[in-house]
């Protein structure tokens, strides 16, 4: 099963579901149906089996594929707490990403 996330563009204000193709402690590769540009601030929200509330992580777009949407984008997480990193680690372990 592929992991889904809620991707929110901070400046534009849109919020969309985005398939996650790759996930690590430092970032993720997502498929976005809206335009993204390197440097854009986004948040990514995951439903984690070990948490009551969604895991919400701040991130910056590091790269995007060229062309019109849908586009693949690499996002780099901006970790603010050790608890969030540990929750992300547990999510990665339960999803089978390595």
Image (cartoon, grey):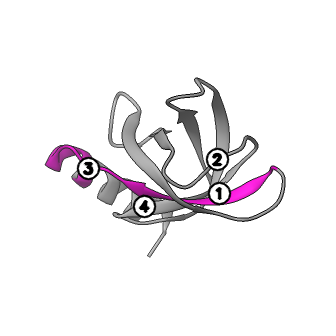
Number of on-image labels? 4
Left or right: 59, with 28 as reference point: left
Decide which of tag 3 and tag 1 comes sooner along the chain.
1
The residue carrying mark 3 is 79
- Please identify the residue farthest to the left as the structure is shown: 82
Q: Secondary structure at mark 2?
A: loop
The residue mark sitting in front, 4 or 1, is 4
Rendered position, 65 above or below 13:
below
Q: CA distance from mark 2 to mark 1?
A: 22 Å
Q: CA distance from mark 4 to mark 3?
A: 10 Å
Q: Residues within 10 Å of mark 3 (few under 14, many from 20)?
A: some
Quick one: 74 or 23, which is closer to the camera? 74
The residue carrying mark 2 is 36
Q: Where does residue 64 sit, x and y in percent of width and height?
A: 64, 61
Range shown magenta: 69-85
Q: Secondary structure at mark 3?
A: loop
Rendered position, 90 above or below 58:
below
Left or right: 36, with 33 as reference point: left
Residue at image coords 36%, 28%: 53
């Amino acid at each position: 099963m592929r992991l889904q996330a809620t991707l929110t563009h901070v400046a534009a204000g849109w919020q969309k579901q985005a398939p996650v193709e790759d996930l690590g402690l430092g970032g993720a590769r997502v498929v976005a149906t809206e335009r993204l540009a390197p440097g854009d601030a986004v948040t990514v929200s995951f439903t984690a089996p070990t948490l009551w509330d969604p895991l919400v992580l701040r991130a910056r777009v590091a790269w995007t594929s060229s062309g019109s949407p849908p586009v693949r984008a690499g996002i780099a997480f901006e970790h603010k707490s050790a608890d969030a990193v540990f929750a992300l680690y547990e999510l990665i372990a339960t999803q089978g990403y390595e």
